[in-house]
Amino acid sequence: MGLARPYVASRFNGLSPVATVSLAMRRSTLPFVVMLGLLFLVFGSVLPDPVGQYSTQMRNATNQFVTGLFPKQRPRLTPNERTERQLEEAENRQ
């Protein structure tokens, strides 16, 4: 008979202790890293020149990316084009 492992109730059952620590650390540090990134985007331009320049470039690139996700709403015709075309057709019929 082999020795039985004691059952430990955990949401990380089946994972090695190293994996549980790294998984728990990733979950707790992700909001912190996201918050630092947002702060860098918003307030990074007030930092000294090389870092402030990177923040400005990142903000511009992010703005262009988000703006590019939504296509521009352009009307298919100019407002008077259809009316002008109908008037020309009516004049040509006569």
Image (tube, helix red, strand yellow):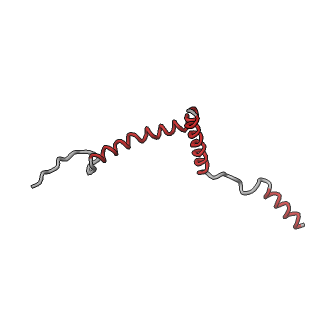
* Rendered location of residue 26, percent (x, y): 38, 43
71, 58: nearer the viewer: 58
Q: Farthest right residue?
A: 94
20, 92: nearer the viewer: 20
Counting the numbered discs, the total is 0
Which residue occupies 38% across, 40% down?
28
86, 40: nearer the viewer: 40
Q: Please say if 4 is above or below 45.
A: below
Query: Left or right: 34 with respect to 86?
Result: left
Which residue occupies 34% across, 43% down?
24
* Rendered location of residue 6, percent (x, y): 17, 47
Q: Farthest front residue?
A: 50
* Rendered location of residue 9, percent (x, y): 23, 45
Query: Left or right: 85 with respect to 18?
Result: right
Q: Please say if 31 is above or below 14.
A: above
Which residue occupies 82% across, 61% down?
86
Q: Farthest bottom residue?
A: 93
Query: Left or right: 63 with respect to 9?
Result: right
Query: Left or right: 83 with respect to 8?
Result: right
Which quadrant: the C terminus? bottom right
Q: Please say if 94 is above or below 23.
A: below
Which quadrant: the N terminus? bottom left
